[in-house]
Amino acid sequence: MPRTLCLLHANCQGEALRPLLEKTPAFARLFRLRGYTNYTREAIGRKDLRDCGLFLYQRLGSHWGDLSTERLLSRLSPDCQRIEIPNFFFKGYWPLWTHAHKSIDFADSLLEELLARGLAPHEALRLYLCAGPRLLGDVAVVAEESLGEAEKREAACPVRYGHLLRERWREEQMFLTINHPGPALLFHLADGLLRLLGLGGLPETARRAYRHPDDEFWLPIHPALNGLLGLPFARRDRRYPVFAASLTHREYTSCYLACRSQGVKDLVVFLRNLPGGFRPAA
């Protein structure tokens, strides 16, 4: 019996979810999965839309044109099952993250403010590392607002994660970066989808075999959040995977400032080019 085509229309989170579904025998017997990356505006073939029997998608507004959710849903067969999945996002571990600086990924609002004041990189580093609530702001409020936003954004999704994040975010790190959920959240989503499809949930074999595709980069967390928010994993001596390197928060911040002082616009490219075993000067 031919397998039904399943289309997964999502951002990079779809690539993290995909192996969990494909490594579940009950799903693999029934579906052949084809992924489309939404933020790159990858077009979905007319035939794929016509043949699709299961459409998993993250919602896109009307400004996405032909790739908007409403436009895509209207082009599917009436018999196609449609399931909206959440678009994961959380600032609680990184309350200083900002998208206001388009020239650098994972921009930090406090570091950018210190540099804008004319501080030299070593001065900015010293102030940043010893920053308390006056400079960091009310980090608990930022976390609560982000939790609330997650719960609001997932309202139309049959599998929700906000309650799980709210319960566990302080005791274990649930995100690798602001928009890269960790294994616990991905397991929860995959398990919920499989149960919705009547396929019995995520098997233990798929959990054990899982390798996160974005595991090469964990955005370091400011150690001050250990005391301010009670995050035991936000230690000063913790080393985070930063592509080929393994850096503490201090070392990562030094690299960030070096990137900015050298006028490199792409922080990720800068970090990817760090040699293995790299240690920045103190």
Image (cartoon, helix red, strand yellow):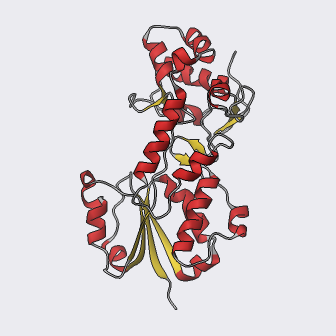
The residue positioned 67% from the left and 34% from the top of the image is: 231
Farthest residue in the bottom direction? 1
| Residue 128: quadrant of the picture | top right
- In depth, the one of 103 and 262 nearer the eye is 103
The residue positioned 50% from the left and 43% from the top of the image is: 147
Where is residue 65 drawn, in percent x and y? 24, 56
Where is residue 225 drawn, in percent x and y? 63, 28
Vertical order, 248 against 162 (above or below): above
Taking the image as shown, residue 69 lies to the left or right of residue 244, namely: left
Q: Quadrant of the C terminus?
A: top right
- In depth, the one of 64 and 172 nearer the eye is 172
Taking the image as shown, residue 55 lies to the left or right of residue 271, namely: left
- Asked whether residue 130 appears in the rendered view, the answer is yes
Vertical order, 178 against 40 (above or below): above
The residue positioned 58% from the left and 82% from the top of the image is: 29
Where is residue 7 drawn, in percent x and y? 43, 70
